[in-house]
Amino acid sequence: MVFLSLRLNRLFMKWITRERPKIDRIACPWLIKRFIDQEAEFIYVPYEQVISLAQELGATPFDIPGVEFTHYGDLCTFDYFIKKYNVKDEAVLTMAPIVRGADTDHHELAVQAAGLWALSAGLAYNLKDDLALLEQGMVLYDALYSWAKFLQKEKHTQQPFENLLLDVLHKFLHGKSKSGKKMPAWAQELKELIQDHIDTNLTLKELSKDLAINPSYLSREFSKHFDNLSFGEYIRKQRIEKAIALMAMPAHSLTDIAYLTGFSDQSHFTRIFKKHTGQNPSDYRKKLKDI
């Protein structure tokens, strides 16, 4: 009889589950070793052998139907381990909906869920040895934990020219509102979030999660700190400002600029640009060259 195990001859707690793990069967061992029992053993076997080998080896089965450590309702096995062992670590709690979304194909639960699934599926495809897969998966979840604990507020500038854009739009990222009142911290952070992700399809609901602010309050208070503009109006204005900055760079075509500023296509970009500036992008760019 063939099965896979870590340190099978040790007397620490054993856990057993079905072979070829993807999400829960990697995430749960990570959680166990990092927060419950760092010397735990993990065994991967064919599905039909899990229960019989659990009894034979004195191992606890997990992530299969009909056992204690499994899915309950919309929650996955990772959620149950957190509840069972009363794990209160904030970073782990941040990871929970990401793992759940990836494991249950509900990627809307967390924006990172689709990425976790993609990486996990790729690892499983590349590594046919389940223990090697677990070893690499531990590295993956250590990285996700570090992001959740230390790096959630970190932002990545994807293109070198965006550093220039940050300088060009510096006046929008710092200072006071038009009323002269000091801008609250959440509004300052929101400006930075918008600028970092101006080329994506931002929604006020998603931003409210990042800021940990009620979306209704954010919608109500938004215009007070953003030039008396609604969220949609402000986003369009920022995209046009970014487009104008990019027009000074000859390497970018108008099609490139439309893409880099988050417009669905060039015709949409042209329509919104003309509404804000009174000119077509091509005419505006030509005047820039003549200056």
Image (tube, rainbow, N blue to C red):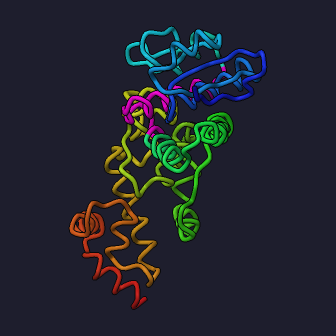
Q: With 264 as the anchor, is 169 left or right in this view?
A: right
Say above or below: 94 vs 132: above
Residue 195, given in percent of the width and then of the height, sits at 49, 54
Q: Quadrant of the C terminus?
A: bottom left
Q: Would you say residue 98 sits in the magenta stretch?
A: yes
Region rendered in magenta? 89-113
Residue at screen point 66% across, 22% down:
32
Q: With 189 as the anchor, is 73 left or right in this view?
A: left
Say above or below: 239 vs 122: below
Residue 202, given in percent of the width and then of the height, sits at 38, 47
Q: Can residue 159 be seen in this view?
A: yes
Residue at screen point 41% across, 65% down:
241
Closer to us: 128 or 289: 128
Q: Would you say residue 148 sits in the magenta stretch?
A: no
Residue 59, given in percent of the width and then of the height, sits at 63, 13
Closer to us: 290 or 155: 155
Q: Which residue lies furthest to the bottom in this view?
A: 290
